[in-house]
Image (cartoon, rainbow, N blue to C red):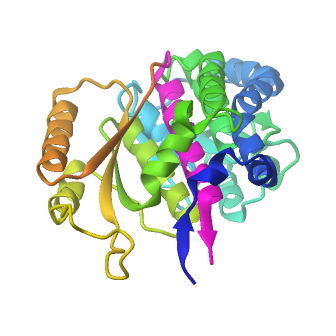
Amino acid sequence: MATWFDESRLDDEDVLARFDLRLRELAESGARVRREAAESESGIAAAVVTARDAPRPRAIVAAGPDSRLLRAVLEPWCPVPFVAWPGPALPGWAGGLDLVVVLAPDGSDRATAAAVAEAVRRGCQVVVASPEGSLVAQHAEGRWSAIVPTVTRDPLATAVVVLEYLDQVGLGPRADHADVARALDEVAVACSPHRDLAVNPGKMLAIALADTNPVVWGGSSLAARAARRVSETIRRASGRSAIAGDAEHLLPLVEAARPRDVFDDPFAEDGGDARPMLLVFDDGADDPVVREDRDRLLGAAAEHGVRVETLTTDAATEVARYASLVLSGRYGAEYLRLGLVEE
């Protein structure tokens, strides 16, 4: 069975209607952040009061499967040592002097609940963001525990409210949910299914992805995290390879691209090998190392005739820029899914 990309489907009202639920979920990303912030406001206030009564933590342990996002945000800013611990337990040294932060948007993961119970048993300060009454929330009850109730089951919205808490207690950078929601709304408007593909960055990205094997790069820690998330989304949407990594890992893939032959027949049976396409996530980071890596990748792409697409954002905060890049990439992946036809 052959699979090909039909870009006319991207503006076909009947096809768009069949994908309405998926596209609506993306469009409501900003609304979910606002709802989560409103619903968790009292929980955050109570957690801040608890933190004021406790000594400043020796270290922060972010536990659970979504801990790596907190690490990407906090590592450059956190005034105390920070560890992301995505496994099912806690590091052996974590104890009463440490703060354990858990993101559990669903609240039903048994391994996360066990980690939370262990943190409470050890006397750690514990902050858990999960649905009220969930398995994880039930295991979090303790003297030094604070539960921030969540309602959307959205990992990004949950992360934003926890980052707002850490900002208010002086353990993280500015993380205003309004900035994040605004950035997500701007992407949703720009990538709306009702916008023609000629002026729709999501649809244009899907066309660029259609006949290529994307290699995805982000320079800063958050842009790199966004690149990994989007590459996962592209793989799920298309069943094709999409690789994210550091510059030194992606350079060989770019440099191995065979030179273009203007006489190649794109419709020939033996001409179906997809070329790499370099997808750059640019969040405005101007670190010298980031600039050097970007120049190396772009130089290699130009030398070997590899197409380059760049996703940019001018959102106000680091977290908002991360959210904007991820949603832009997710729209591209969803439009790619929409345009693929099997026959």
Extreme residue toward the right, this view = 133
Question: Residue 216 or 204: which is nearer the viewer?
Answer: 204
Please name the residue shown 48% across and 44% down the image: 205
Query: Up-down: is 168 above or below 211?
Result: above
**Quarter occupied by the C terminus:** bottom right
- Residue 235's spot in the image, x, y percent? 51, 63
Query: Up-down: is 170 above or below 256?
Result: above
Please name the residue shown 42% across and 61% down the image: 211
Name which quarter of the figure residue 88 lies in. bottom right
Question: Residue 210 or 159: which is nearer the viewer?
Answer: 210
Could you tell me if residue 263 is visible in this image? yes
Q: Is residue 218 left or right of residue 53?
A: left
Question: Residue 76 or 183: which is nearer the viewer?
Answer: 183
Magenta stretch, main secondary structure, is helix
- Residue 61's spot in the image, x, y percent? 50, 43
**Quarter occupied by the N terminus:** bottom right
Magenta extent: 315-343
- Residue 324's spot in the image, x, y percent? 53, 31
